[in-house]
Amino acid sequence: MAEGTQPEVLFWVGCAGSFDQRAQKITKAFATILDKVGVSFAIMGKEEMCTGDPARRSGNEFLFQMMAYNNIQLLNGYEVKKIVTACPHCFNIFKNEYPSLGGNYEVIHHTTFINSLINEGKIVMKEGGAFKGKKITYHDSCYLGRANQIYEAPRAVLEALDVELVEMKRCKTNGLCCGAGGAQMFKEDEPGDKRINIERSEEALATGASVIAANCPFCTTMLMDGVKNKEKEDEVQVLDIAEMVAQSI
Amino acid sequence: MHIIQQILFVLLVAAAVFLFARKVREIRRNINLGKDEKINDNPAARWKNMLLLAFGQKKMFKRMTPAILHFFVYAGFVIINIEILEIILDGIFGTHRMFAPYLGSLYPVLIGIFEILAALVLVSCAIFLVRRNILKLKRLNQSELNGWPKTDANAILITEIVLMSLLLTMNAADFNLQQLGSEHYHPVGAFWVSGFIAPLFNGMSEGALMGLERGAWWLHIVGIFAFLNYLPYSKHLHIVLAFPNAYYAKLMPQGEMKNMPEIQNEVLYMMEPDKAPTDLDPNAAPPRFGAKDVTDLSWKNLMDAYSCTECGRCTANCPANMTGKKLSPRKIMMDTRDRMEEMSKNIDANKGSFVEDGKSLLHDYITTEELRACTTCNACVEACPVSIDPLSIILQLRRNLVMEESNAPQEWNQMFGNIENNMAPWKFSPDDRDKWVGEMG
């Protein structure tokens, strides 16, 4: 971006996608897809900053407003028009909360973006892909699902992968949280009898799926921990939809 | 004799309406303890919500068994009210079944339909009592319901059963009187349900039957007026407030948190001092950030609290609650109403103005442990059939905790520090943010 060219889209990586080792794989997978398809994209690189989501949701509005101010200055300075992100929390903030603060962009979640690339015929899955016919369950993240009513695009991508989709009982509007939202990712659970990610992972494992598909780096981490806790990590993978697509083209 | 009954009846109606109106004014005042907020955008979408969510009970149908039973009770309530109109007019004018001559052969059909509904209400309420007290459904037996809330719930169901039984008894006795050719009792024929009860009263004298019919008639209508006046003290108020509450429901995406323009501006003036207004009153009291008490919440939050019928769908769907944490969105709503009513009593006792009582919604009713357990997943908001938003209250209280009390767990304070210093919630150097690029194949 700093080079003065105007790429098609800004890929907003997000903190998890940038720093978390597991989530970096999702970032790389999505960048691979964009490269292969020939979508010109930019990243903010070292200039990217936290959107302020965990600060705002834990109650620290000052810190959120600081981050929002700085990010909007930066994005507007680069005349960013279109943002794609692999994090539903960043997506929600950009789409719903930055506009009233002066940040107006077309914002797309990566699962929706991938789905349109498939529909436009730009992504073509290879014959007999890695997931063809496999039993797969899909976890709706709260911030893509209930928060923004995006339920179908990620499922359409899974359909294009020719998987056998098995839904959990609590899905779509009734989807169960992974336990990370509302800044819970950054602290221990409050006292209780179970961790939320265990509850959700048990439900996902009960479907008998060999892959739990996710759309959020935080959900991915939470569900992987849950699967490990149940000692199923050798049989069941937790993968972001971008990773599944990257392996199939 | 008749004229005394008519006078008594008119006095009863006047008293019932007067008392109810007085309580309605009090509730209106209590809701207005909340902060003013304009909610009048997009009326078309709002009417649609009222039609689908309140009138059509759309969200109830996520769980079929209670949805169908509840629908019977709801339809019964709305439709049987047409007969209440006749009963009230009969009471005032000293007539009996005054609509019968006008409706002709349609009359027994209408009453028949009302009776079937009455029977369905009766059976549904009985099943509801079983679900609550014998099957002990978890959502209807959680700790926040101990004491008055459980009594309230059972009282409502039992009252409805009694009222419906009285209606059917009245009609059954009426039929027996018709057969005896009793003056005053129009020969409209047996009704669809009470026709089966009528044989129980065979052989009773005309006087006894009239006593039974009049007794049931009076108890029924007195019961209705008593129930009307019980509503504002009860969780059952949802039958009224579900409608405006759906109209005023949040229309923006569920994921969107309400902005705080006062803080937005403070940050703006800090970053761009030339934009700061110069005519600020230096002596103005600093605003309170977030909500500590019900008076800091919006009036819509307070109307939410009065609309809650404590069904617990929010709590049953709350990931924190189902994994044993203290948070229960239903309790958040019940606490908000309890605190509001405590303030209301305080205002009444102190000639119309609130005298500081050293208490607040935060801490005295809702604890930090409850607030910190929320994942902001919106499951409670999605689950509520009457458009209540418990998350809105939780987030406003969290803002107060963090910004006014600096009350956050240690890990959150570290997260805040990391965001401020490293631009990420973890302790990584901003220089490493794009390190993954170099690792791409």
Image (cartoon, coloured by chain):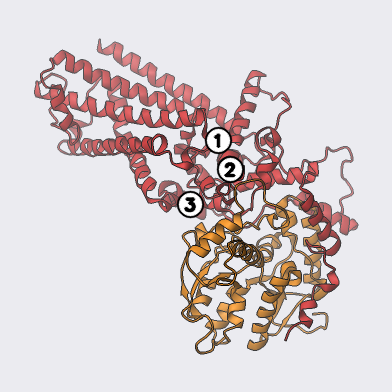
The chain letter corresponding to orange is A
Disc 1 on helix, strand or loop?
helix
The residue nearer to you, when weighing B123 against B183, is B123
Q: Amino acid at mark 1?
A: Glu
Mark 3 vs mark 2, foreground winner is 2
Q: Position of residue B269 (x, y in %)?
A: 86, 55
Residue at left offset 65%, top offset 57%: A181
Q: Secondary structure at mark 3?
A: helix
Q: Disc 3 designates what residue?
A: B49
Residue on which the image places disc 2:
B328
Dot 2 falls on a residue whose secondary structure is: loop
Seen at 13% across and 24% down, the residue is: B176
**Would you say A89 lies left or right of B233 here?**
right
| The C terminus of chain A lies in quadrant | bottom right
The answer to which of B208 and B11 lies nearer the viewer is: B208
Asked if the residue at tag 2 contacts the one at tag 3, i.e. Cβ–Cβ closer than 8 Å, the answer is: no
Query: In the rendered image, which quarter is residue B401 located in?
Result: top right
Q: Is residue B297 above or below residue A215?
A: above
User: Which residue occupies the foreground of this view, B68 or B184?
Assistant: B68
Q: Is residue B296 left or right of residue B80?
A: right
Q: Residues within 10 Å of mark 3 (few under 14, many from 20)?
A: many
Q: Amino acid at mark 3?
A: Asn
Q: Amino acid at mark 2?
A: Ser
